[in-house]
Image (tube, helix red, strand yellow):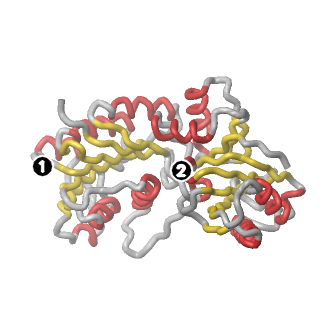
Amino acid sequence: MAAAGRVMFSAAEQSFGSAVRELQVEYGPKLRVERVAPDLGVIAAATPEVSEVAAACVSRPLVFIRHLSVEMARVARPQATDITAVAVAARSVLAGHAAGAALAVQTWVSGSGAMGYGYGSGELFSHLAQDLTAHGFSVSRAGREQVLSGCITVNGVCVGLNRRADSLCDWPGGRVRLSRDDTQVSRAEFKLEELFQTFALRLPGRGRAVDLGASPGGWTRILRQHGLEVWAVDPGDLDARVAADRRVHHVRSTAGEFFRSCDTRFDLAVNDMKMDPMMSCQVMLTAASHLRPGALAILTLKTGTYRPVETVRRCLALLGRSYQVLHARQLHHNRQEVTVVGRRRAAR
């Protein structure tokens, strides 16, 4: 077991290389990253500090990092097969905290298949929660200022500690788990719901929205739940439940055709179209002239696997012509794509 105090980050397994590249662009090409597990890495140096990386994820932004912590201990095999050894490590990490301190405990498994520990993330959480409660801590799963992380990997358990404000996401490893219900139209709705949770994004309480590439209507349905009147633009069909809503206007055309004939001003534009990312950004620049100043725009960039870091940077620069980019991140429910939120700049 070794105390490290180094930045520990999570990224999608298929985007781990992109997350490393962003860090090396930001902090220098010699920055060394240890890949601890498929979606977990540790910066192999005392600097940068976690607060610096968290700030860069927001301001630059670094888009492929989903979650941050500080690795304070690593319980290697075979000691990690004894769950009590992990609890002892967790208590050592918290040794400087006052009795009765409140903290969130978040556990997850990085990798697939049997790890051979005899316990999983659920069992680890329960054991840590019981042990820490018995030693005077007030334990919750989320919503606390301090977050203790326990990530199970094939080589051991990494124990991290971080402020919630610097964690980027208040879910274990950035893995947001949302449940499906009978009213859901498509799984694409999860991307929008996760966005609202991750950034506490507030939509206009009323007004008009345009949903580009709306079929089958999942995002339109969510916008209606927020009280917006929606123009759903797509040549394809909408789910019958969405189409029956009198405040949903289904326009069977492409985005380009729609804007050429549209004189409506909108308070929000969303775009989840399966389109080349630069072309999608061009569509949003066209949409900008139909948005009120200060209106929000939400889109997903389908980056693919070829040079995604460079693709995202070019797209954000292009969007910057008409929008202030507020957020950009590859969320848990994104698949080789990045969700971007912008605010329409006032016309010059």
Q: Is residue 191 visible?
A: yes
Residue 264: assigned label: 1
Of residues 63 and 12, which is closer to you in this image?
63
Q: CA distance from mark 1 to mark 2?
A: 39 Å
Identity of the residue drawn at 46% across and 70% down:
180
- What's the amino acid at mark 1? Thr
Residue 96: assigned label: none
Identity of the residue drawn at 26% across and 34% down:
322
Residue 298: percent from left, percent from top: 34, 48
- What's the amino acid at mark 2? Ala
Q: Earlier in the sequence, mark 1 or mark 2?
A: 2
Identity of the residue drawn at 27% across and 68% down:
242
* Quadrant occupied by the C terminus: top left
State the residue position of label 2. Answer: 165
Of residues 205 and 137, which is closer to you in this image?
137
Callout 2: SS: helix
Q: Is residue 68 left or right of residue 220?
A: right
Q: Is residue 123 visible?
A: no
